[in-house]
Amino acid sequence: MQLTARFNDALQYAVQLHAGQARKVGGEPYAAHLLGVASIALDYGADEDEAIAALLHDAIEDQGGAAVGEEIGRRFSPGVAAIVRGCTDSDTMPKPPWQERKEAFLARLEHASPSVRLVVAADKLHNVRSLLRDYRRYGEAIWRHFKGGREKTLWYYRAVVEILKKTGTTPLVEELDRTVAELEQIVAGEK
C-alpha cells in the first residue's frame, strides 16, 4: 500500500491540532505519540484510512470535541471520523470522571469495528511501551501523572487486552498482551 497526500495532510493537521501538547511523563512532543501509533498501525496492516485515524485518534478527545470529529469527517472522510470517534473516550468538556469514561469506553470496545480495534491496539501498545520506558527511568513517580494511579491504570490496560482478545486475537493484540504483562511484572517487582 502506498500512502497518498491525504496521509500527509492528516499528519500536518494532527501536528497543528496537538501543537504545544506534550506527553505526560517525559514531556516529548505529542506528535511523537501520534507518529508512533500510526507506525504501529501500518506495521500491522492498516490501510490509509486506519493510518490517518491513528494520527488523529486523540484529536476529538483532546482538541475540541465533537466539532473536531465533524471537521475530520469533512477533511478526510466519514469513515476516518468514525474510526477516530470509536477511539475516543469523551467528546465533551469537562470530561466525565476517569473511571466512568474508561468503563464506558471498554463497553463500546467490545462492539467496535476491526478498524477501531486496530487503532486502539496500536495506541495502547505505544502507551504501554512508553510506560515501560518511563517506569525504568523514573520508577513509581510516574503514576502521579495518571488520574487512575498505578492500580487503575494497570487494570485499564489489562481490560483493553482482554476485550481485544475476546473479539479476535491478532499479532498486534498478542504483542500488546505481552507488553502489558511485562509492565505488570516490572511494577510488581518480578523483573
Image (spheres, rainbow, N blue to C red):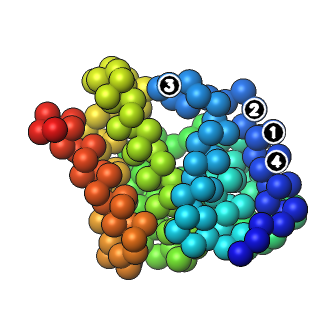
Quarter residue 28 falls in: top right
On residue 26, the disc is 3
Query: Mark 4 touching mark 1, by CB under 8 A?
Result: yes
Q: Which residue does the image show at 21% across and 38% down from the upper left? A: 186
Structural distance between the alpha carbons of marks 4 and 2: 10 Å
Q: Nearer the viewer, mark 3 or mark 1?
A: 3
Q: Amino acid at mark 4?
A: Tyr
The residue at which mark 1 appears reads as: 16
* Circle 1: element type: helix
Structural distance between the alpha carbons of marks 3 and 2: 16 Å
Residue 163 point in image, percent of width and height: 35, 68
Q: Amino acid at mark 2?
A: Ala
Which is nearer the N-term, disc 3 or disc 1?
1
Query: Mark 2 touching mark 1, by CB under 8 A?
Result: yes
Residue 143 in view here: no
Q: Amino acid at mark 3?
A: Gly
Residue 187 point in image, percent of width and height: 21, 35
